[in-house]
Image (tube, rainbow, N blue to C red):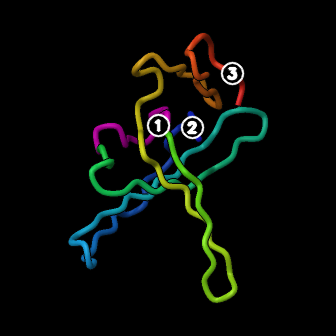
């Protein structure tokens, strides 16, 4: 999935050590544009964290996966970013709530 949204806040950086070594995770809160804006918490892991792009107020184009898992009878959902760019960088559309079509002809409404 891909979304273009404005970075509204950064949550504290989380770090730790697991069986595969050290890890770090940055959760960000982004807000979509439109009549009914939505706030979304997206997690960025490891070397995908680019602090130069993570400035409150920046419009970001985020490619991410949504995953749910069950634990003790409750379900938990994560949005994990696998690519993050400033909106408008690399030929994308800077408008909020827009996605790039497969052939890049023009932006399609989200």
Q: Residues within 10 Å of mark 1 (few under 14, many from 20)?
A: few
Q: Which residue is mark 1?
A: 57
Task: State if disc 3 and disc 2 touch (CB < 8 Å).
Answer: no
Whole-Å distance between the Cαs marked 2 and 1? Answer: 19 Å
58 relative to 20, above or below:
above
Q: CA distance from mark 2 to mark 3?
A: 12 Å
Q: Which range of residues does the magenta coloring cover?
A: 51-62
Quadrant of the rendering where the C terminus is positioned: top right
Q: Please, is residue 76 above or below residue 11 in the view?
A: below
Residue at coordinates 77% horizontally, 40% vertically from top-left?
Answer: 36
Residue 44 sits in quarter: bottom left
Instruction: Indicate the secondary structure of the residue bearing disc 1.
Output: loop
Q: Residue 2 — which label?
A: 2
Image mark for residue 98: none
Crowdedness near tag 2: few (<14), some (14–19) or many (≥20) residues, C-alpha within 10 Å: some
> Circle 3 sits on which residue?
108
């Amino acid at each position: 999935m891909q979304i273009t949204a404005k970075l509204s806040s950064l949550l504290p950086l989380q770090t730790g050590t697991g069986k595969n070594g050290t890890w770090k995770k940055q959760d960000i809160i982004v807000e979509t544009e439109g009549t009914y804006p939505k706030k979304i918490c997206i997690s960025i892991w490891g070397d995908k964290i680019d602090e130069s792009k993570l400035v409150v107020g920046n419009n970001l184009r985020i490619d991410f996966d949504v995953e749910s898992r069950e634990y003790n009878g409750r379900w938990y959902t994560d949005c994990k970013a696998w690519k993050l760019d400033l909106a408008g960088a690399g030929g994308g559309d800077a408008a909020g709530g827009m996605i790039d079509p497969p052939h890049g002809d023009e932006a399609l409404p989200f």
